[in-house]
Amino acid sequence: MRPTEKIKKFTILGILFLLPITAYLFFSSGVNHFAKLPILTEGVLEIDQFESENKEKKELAGHLTILCFFGNNLELTQSNVFNLAHKIYKKNYQFKDLQFVILTPSGTEFQIKSLKQKLSEIENPENWNFVFGNTTEIQKVFKSLGSNFTLNSNFASNQVFLIDKDRNLRGRDNDEDVGLLYGFDSSNYSEINNKMDDDVRILLAEYRLALKKYNSDREI
């Protein structure tokens, strides 16, 4: 075998040997770096002053929450709901610690009933939790998020927010587009399909890992 052929052979073997190791180091470092979403706001206001149409209360504490504000005119935000239903709700709603909560002004119950019928064509809407209260309380909760967004005149926002079990707002502190990313624009299909979908998976993975560790520690 010629020297050049030997060099070529060993170069190929070296690449084949090193490539899996390099890939492993790259992805393992990525997992460690993105293991947790940053906390952007601590102590989001509790929502136990709101009630569902069945007079049931929901709480943020102890749950992973996708928190939404769709306002008093659901026709204007209906497409936002459908974006979430297709890309986030459909694949995640059966995760037992995750809840979808929409703070809704009182008096919109009939609109919600109609919307749920449409949502049932996408997936079982049982875990869409529409809870009702006065607009002052809705404003207080929204303000407690500490975001750079505001509610519009219909007490609605395109932004949806990720809240952890300790009532902390999770997001991105170094987003490539906006820097601080407090919430996800539910009117933007691409942002929901990419950024929000990724961050929801990261948050769920974080708590799965924490639960696995907790169970392991109990067995020791």
Image: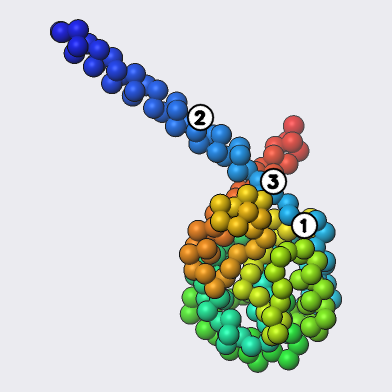
Mark 3, other Cα within 10 Å: few <14 / some 14–19 / many ≥20 = few
Say which residue appears at 50% left-offset and 58% top-offset: 194
Give percent across and percent down for residue 43: 82, 59
Residue beneath label 2, please? 25
Q: Quadrant of the N terminus?
A: top left
The answer to whether 140 appears left or right of 157 in the picture is right
- Judged from the image, the secondary structure of the residue bearing numbered disc 2 is helix
Q: Which of marks 2 and 3 is in front?
A: 2
- Disc number at residue 120? none
Q: Earlier in the sequence, mark 2 or mark 1?
A: 2
Q: Which of marks 1 and 3 is nearer the N terminus?
A: 1
Alpha carbon of mark 1 to alpha carbon of mark 3: how far? Answer: 23 Å
Give percent across and percent down for residue 187: 54, 73
Q: Name, please, the residue furthest toward the left.
A: 1
Residue beneath label 1, please? 41
The quarter of the picture where residue 17 lies is top left
Q: In this view, does 71 lie above or below 91?
A: below
The three-letter amino acid code for the residue at tag 1 is Thr
The three-letter amino acid code for the residue at tag 2 is Leu
Give percent across and percent down for residue 109: 69, 89
Q: Which of marks 2 and 1 is in front?
A: 1
